[in-house]
Amino acid sequence: MPDYDVLCIGNAIVDIIAQCDEVFLETNGIIKGAMNLIDTQRAELLYSRMGPAIEASGGSAGNTAAGVASFGGRAAFFGKVSNDALGEIYAHDIHAQGVAFDTTPLKGEPPTARSMIFVTPDGERSMNTYLGACVELGPEDVEADKASGAKVTYFEGYLWDPPRAKEAIRQTAKLAHAAGREVSMTLSDSFCVD
């Protein structure tokens, strides 16, 4: 019997969610309803301008692992955070959901990924995502026992872009296939398909 129902591999991102009005979006050049990738400076600027916020672990694969665990499944997750406050929040939240997450945090820069999500009164969300440490996931982060011990391994398509993450995906898939396990991959976004 497999140790896990699902092993998810993806971007470890902390969602930072705050309410705002339309004027805030316009003043800060935020496209309403869109997801924009941003750099370090833009992330720091937007964070400094945010009102009170809720911080919680996120990312599509991490959320999938948390969902599996919430329905009583056994889930594990590979994703990279940094050794910082947001990395601690991510690890705490995903562990609290019952997900096995043991990836060694990155020491130093870049910081843990975050998505600053601004929600307007009409409920529309506008996401501004800084990828940070999550793109540093590499082959050394693959835990062979989890890779071969999950019934299904689920890869987030976004990680097919960074070269080291692609190596980690290939290594994990080989281990899973060698153990006779199923492997799946989300397409995530149109750029992943192109």
Image (spheres, rainbow, N blue to C red):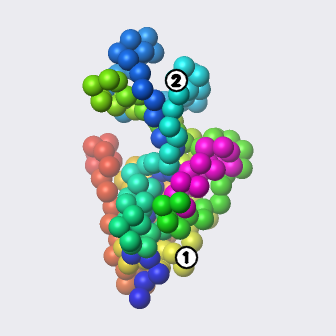
The residue sitting at 49% across, 66% down in the picture is 98
Question: Gap between marks 2 and 1, in whole Å?
Answer: 42 Å
- The amino acid type found where label 2 is placed reads Gly
Query: Which of the labelled discs sits on residue 132, or is there none?
Result: none
In the rendered view, would you say 92 is above or below 113?
A: below
Question: Is 169 a magenta residue?
Answer: no
Q: Nearer the viewer, residue 190 or 16?
A: 16
Question: Is 92 a magenta residue?
Answer: yes
Based on the displayed image, in which of its 4 quarters is residue 123 positioned? top left
Residue marked by disc 2: 51
The N terminus, quarter of image: bottom left
What secondary structure is found at the residue carrying circle 1? helix
Q: Nearer the viewer, residue 103 or 144?
A: 103
Relative placement, left or right, of 70 versus 138 is: left
Dot 1 surroundings within 10 Å: few (below 14), some, or many (20 or more)?
few
Q: Nearer the viewer, residue 193 or 154?
A: 154
Residue marked by disc 1: 144
